[in-house]
Amino acid sequence: MSKEFEIVREFEVDVPPERVWAAVTTGTGGYLWPMEPPEPRTGGRGPFGSTVVVWEPPHRYVNRSEDVGMPTQSLNQLDHTIEPRDEGRRAFVRYVHSGIFTDDWDTQYDGANKHTDFYLHTLREYLTHFAPAPVAFAQLTGPASSAVPEALATAARALGLPDGAAAGTKVSVRGPGGRALYAVLDYREPEFIGLRTEGALVRFFGRGRWGAPLGISVHDFAPGADAEADGAAWQDWLNGVFSQS
């Protein structure tokens, strides 16, 4: 049965509003995934065939899709409100994701709600540590054997993350090819792990809770970063972890 949903988050970040605006309109690869920039006007074309319904730079941007091309969702709207704080040195952000889920509402809402927290945390990490540096983005999907709730714990063991390591801990993990990666464990929840190295954000999505394979996104800000090489290395790592689990 179709049912509306609304997910609302508010936060402040220590960057000017203009930097947040750039991130949510043209810099999405730094924290989410690269998207077609919106046509900069009300009524213009937005990402994935959406329509820009509000365009008020650098304070409010809303896009809306009435046919999102998914069997579980018929309406999707993303609403970003950005306000200055401390004479423009900081920004307040209100994010509202709303729409209509058409099937398995509880599961769809649970997934969207938890992913929202992780994506917005990654946005703050990007804004605070890397923006507006250019990014090389890679997105990987694990094999079918990783579509189980315990997959993220398996990935954490392969990385060498201590069970008790909490967000904010400095860690050394085993990345592709057994290479040591020195990072801050910037996010850790039952479904997600976030690592911030000196030059990259590496995000792990334990989507087995929702019946999907484990995913990894790599946002590499190092000079000369190679998205194809990053993707190949982490895909090999994923395949190796779950061929042995």
Image (tube, rainbow, N blue to C red):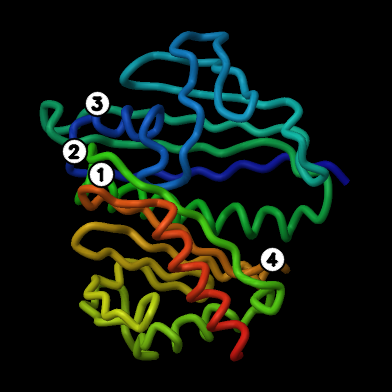
Mark 4, secondary structure of its residue: loop
- Of circles 3 and 4, the one toward us is 4
Q: Mark 2 or mark 4, which has the lower sequence index?
A: 2
- Label 3 CA crowd tier, 10 Å (few <14, some 14–19, many 20+): some
Mark seen at residue 15: 2
User: What percent of the width, then of the height, locates residue 17?
Assistant: 24, 29
How many marks the image carries: the answer is 4
**Kind of residue at badge 2:** Val
- For disc 4, the marked residue is 212
- For disc 3, the marked residue is 18
CA gap, disc 1 and disc 2: 7 Å
Say if mark 2 contacts mark 4, CB within 8 Å: no
Residue at image x 79%, y 46%? 72
- Label 4 CA crowd tier, 10 Å (few <14, some 14–19, many 20+): some
Q: Please, is residue 159 above or below residue 1 in the view?
A: below
- For disc 1, the marked residue is 127
User: What percent of the width, then of the height, locates residue 70?
Assistant: 77, 41
Q: Quadrant of residue 46?
A: top right
Say if mark 1 contacts mark 2, CB within 8 Å: yes
